[in-house]
Image (spheres, grey):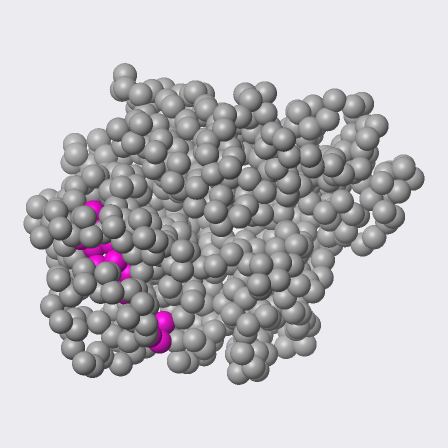
């Protein structure tokens, strides 16, 4: 191993989060955090994602990358795997065919850029406005934005296109594009504005079917592209063939690799290839595993984009385990008990941060924006009458769903002050308040000369660093407001679900104050007018760490006396406060510290012209799409969740696909496994129990009262004026 390689490996942090390197002159070069999600087509990348108990290594291959770069990336992946103790799962990712897990790291989508680092291109140049490019945006769940020729010939009527001119970004929506695609494209545009332009680029939207409604923006587009032709290309199906559940369930066969008695290739009929390395395999054999998998794909004449996973005994992926009817990890227990994976990653203390290491390499967890140990300075404002109102420091950490907040975090790095500006948006906040929050964020950003990193935080989706700022005492109230002068009566009882084991990852979320909201896996706080109950579920809720965090957050929530209540030993007054006993999520299958088989969620849709099932990795309630049918596989049941706007054909196809999914599953699933058909807004506890902090009121707002899609509010007169000014300065 070269000295450069050793230096790169020594710089790797083993704390939870995301780290990315590009291959430049056969060396691993770190990619800056602001550039995460941007990939040059001529390069190869290594992506390391570390969770609390495991690690995944992905190596990404650009479609124009050289064979030498691909070979170097494979070597570095092997060295990185050895450096981390051999426990990570390795994934081979090909541009345009990335796995759902890989795409889940980049919530705002992937941007494919022309060229490569070796050609002199930079990943990101913040606040640089000398830009002219056209991005072709595709995808509804997982978005990709590819640089294409800046010409009308690149357009078609079914997709979204972003004309990026530096200080102005104009989004053109194809007449046949759908609402979900438009929303995703807006998020891509906002991400470019926030990360690459310091929040100071203007965004405008043109609907291709109603261009006469946006004359000023069309003038901007035609100034750059020339007159629009009379006819644009017809819609094209997605190039990315996201592997459906059918292909994943293709017949699986074991092939013993000739170079070792302890290495096997699992061939899923060409849809994916998995390599399992036994602990007795030699170092040379383990190093060759990835190359042998690629060679196997070529020998079988499978497509070059075939998915490859490489894993070590004891570090198998959830997908791998799903191929077996019965799988039990070493040391795995049922009910009470905790299991840990093998390898160096699992041996690191995950509850305390090494401050010296953080300052040495502050890109600890880009996925969670974990830049330090959260010991910096905090200032919080609330949006009040569309202006900023300072929040009393005694109330820091308490957020109301009817409000929006700005949280400015200041910390030191290399002797300089750095800033993160969080924009927290309550679920019940009005459209005007959300708009004002973004506007005030720009004002604050200007006050600090564009230095703050701006992060939008949607209620319930708080990143770890945001939680850590409030030292384990963050409380989210479902609705209401903390604004002065607003007389909101205090409910007689309030119920909060507490999740977390340390001051870095704990929050309390208000849930409906009834017994059906309880869950045996967690701690709950029931606040009444005379005392506060600490209810401990009989699984993890009884662990020492969660008890401590529950007690700490209860002291913030209530000054009344505290009473500890163990599940199954509740006094009558407890149930009276909740309106009586009722069934709640207490299924023994939810009581495993590590479930035998992790639940999997699939989106079932025919909006691309053909029916497909696409897996959603690291799912949450917000991933349930009202326009589609979703399939949740909890192993013991199959749930078909039907959104209010799903069409009948999708519903019928999903039902047939659920039956075929079971029939073709390589683990030999019971074809009589119950298939449960449920409708949006009528979810049973056996379904909602698989989701964190389920919100039963999420879809209760009538369509007339629902906020308009963001692109409908973007084209204000102020924006048009600013776009025209930007255009005149540029041209």
Q: Quadrant of the N terminus?
A: top left
What residue is rendered at 18% in x and 48% in y?
726
Q: In the figure, is residue 298 to the left or right of 537?
A: left
How many numbered badges does the structure rendering display?
Answer: 0
Decide which of 390, 591 is in the foreground and name it.
390
**Image spot of residue 670 (x, y percent):** 64, 73
**Image spot of residue 316 (x, y percent):** 47, 53
Decide which of 146, 706 is in the foreground and name it.
706
| Among the 4 quarters of the image, the one containing residue 210 | bottom left
Q: In the figure, is residue 570 to the left or right of 596?
A: right
| Among the 4 quarters of the image, the one containing residue 134 | bottom left
Q: Is residue 321 shown in magenta?
A: no
Q: Residue furthest right?
A: 572
Q: In the figure, is residue 66 to the left or right of 370?
A: left
Q: Is residue 577 above or below residue 319?
A: above
Q: Is residue 173 above or below residue 573?
A: below
**Image spot of residue 181 (x, y percent):** 38, 65
**Image spot of residue 332 (x, y percent):** 61, 46
What residue is rendered at 92% in x and 39% in y?
572
Which range of residues does the magenta coloring cover?
A: 161-177
Q: Is residue 168 shown in magenta?
A: yes
Q: Is residue 305 above or below residue 287?
A: below
What residue is rendered at 16% in x and 44% in y?
129
What residue is rendered at 43% in x and 35% in y?
422
Q: In the figure, is residue 78 to the left or right of 377?
A: left
**Residue 535 visible in the shown view:** no
**Residue 558 visible in the shown view:** yes
Q: Residue furthest top?
A: 415
């Amino acid at each position: 191993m070269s000295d450069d390689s050793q230096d790169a490996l020594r710089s790797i942090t083993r704390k939870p989060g995301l780290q990315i390197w590009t291959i430049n002159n056969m060396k691993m070069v770190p990619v800056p955090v602001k550039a995460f999600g941007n990939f040059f087509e001529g390069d190869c990348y290594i992506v390391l994602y570390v969770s609390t108990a495991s690690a995944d290594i992905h190596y990404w291959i650009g479609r124009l990358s050289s064979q030498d770069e691909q070979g170097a990336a494979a070597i570095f992946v092997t060295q990185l795997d050895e450096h981390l103790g051999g426990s990570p799962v390795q994934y081979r990712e090909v541009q345009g065919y990335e796995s759902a897990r890989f795409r889940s790291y980049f919530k705002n989508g992937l941007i494919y850029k022309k060229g490569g680092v070796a050609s002199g291109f930079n990943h990101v140049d913040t606040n640089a406005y000398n830009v002219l490019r056209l991005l072709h945006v595709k995808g509804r769940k997982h978005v990709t934005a590819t640089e294409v020729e800046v010409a009308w010939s690149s357009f078609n009527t079914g997709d979204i296109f972003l004309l990026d001119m530096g200080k102005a970004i104009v989004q053109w929506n194809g007449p046949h594009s759908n609402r979900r695609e438009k929303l995703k494209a807006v998020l891509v545009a906002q991400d470019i504005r926030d990360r690459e332009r310091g929040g100071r680029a203007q965004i405008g939207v043109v609907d291709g079917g109603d261009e006469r409604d946006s004359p000023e923006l069309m003038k901007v587009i035609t100034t750059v592209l020339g007159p629009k032709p009379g006819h644009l290309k017809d819609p094209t199906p997605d190039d990315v063939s996201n592997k459906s559940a059918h292909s994943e369930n293709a017949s699986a066969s074991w092939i013993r690799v000739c170079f070792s008695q302890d290495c096997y290739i699992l061939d899923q009929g060409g849809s994916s290839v998995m390599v399992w390395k036994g602990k007795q395999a030699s170092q040379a054999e383990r190093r060759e595993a990835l190359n042998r998998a690629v060679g196997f794909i070529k020998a079988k004449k499978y497509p070059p984009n075939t998915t490859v996973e490489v894993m070590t005994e004891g570090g198998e992926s959830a997908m791998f385990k799903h191929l077996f009817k019965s799988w039990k990890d070493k040391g795995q227990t049922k009910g009470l008990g905790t299991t840990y994976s093998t390898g160096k990653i699992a041996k690191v203390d995950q509850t305390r941060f090494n401050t010296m290491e953080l300052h040495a390499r502050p890109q600890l967890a880009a996925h969670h924006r974990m830049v330090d140990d959260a010991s910096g300075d905090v200032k919080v404002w609330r949006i009040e009458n569309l202006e900023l109102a300072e929040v009393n420091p005694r109330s820091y950490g308490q957020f109301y769903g009817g409000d929006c907040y700005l949280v400015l975090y200041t910390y030191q790095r290399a002797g300089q002050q750095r800033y993160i500006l969080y924009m927290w948006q309550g679920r019940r906040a009005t459209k005007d308040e959300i708009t004002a929050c973004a506007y005030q964020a720009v004002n604050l950003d200007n006050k600090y000369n564009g230095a703050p990193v701006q992060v939008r935080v949607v209620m319930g989706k708080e990143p770890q660093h945001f939680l850590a700022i409030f030292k384990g005492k963050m409380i989210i109230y479902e609705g209401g407001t903390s604004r002065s002068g607003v007389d909101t009566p205090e409910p007689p009882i309030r119920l909060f679900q507490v999740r977390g084991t340390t001051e870095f990852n704990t929050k309390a979320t208000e849930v409906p104050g009834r017994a059906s909201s309880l869950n045996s896996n967690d701690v709950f706080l029931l606040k009444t007018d005379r005392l506060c109950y600490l209810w401990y579920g009989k699984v993890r809720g009884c662990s020492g760490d969660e008890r401590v965090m529950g007690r700490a957050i209860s002291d913030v929530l209530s000054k009344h006396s505290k009473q500890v209540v163990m599940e199954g030993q509740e006094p009558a007054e407890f149930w009276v406060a909740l309106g009586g006993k009722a069934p709640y999520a207490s299924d023994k299958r939810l009581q495993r510290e590590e479930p035998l088989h992790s639940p999997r969620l699939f989106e079932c849709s025919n909006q691309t012209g053909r029916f497909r099932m696409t897996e959603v990795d690291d799912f949450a309630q917000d991933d349930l799409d009202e326009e589609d049918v979703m399939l949740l596989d909890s192993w013991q049941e199959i749930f078909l969740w039907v959104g209010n706007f799903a069409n009948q054909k999708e519903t019928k196809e999903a039902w047939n696909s659920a039956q075929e999914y079971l029939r073709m599953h390589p683990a030999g699933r019971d074809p009589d496994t119950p298939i449960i058909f449920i409708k949006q807004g009528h979810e049973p506890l056996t379904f909602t129990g698989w989701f964190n902090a389920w919100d039963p009121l999420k879809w209760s707002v009538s369509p007339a009262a629902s906020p308009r899609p963001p692109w409908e509010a973007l084209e204000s007169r102020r924006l048009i004026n600013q776009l025209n000014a930007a255009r005149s300065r540029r041209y």
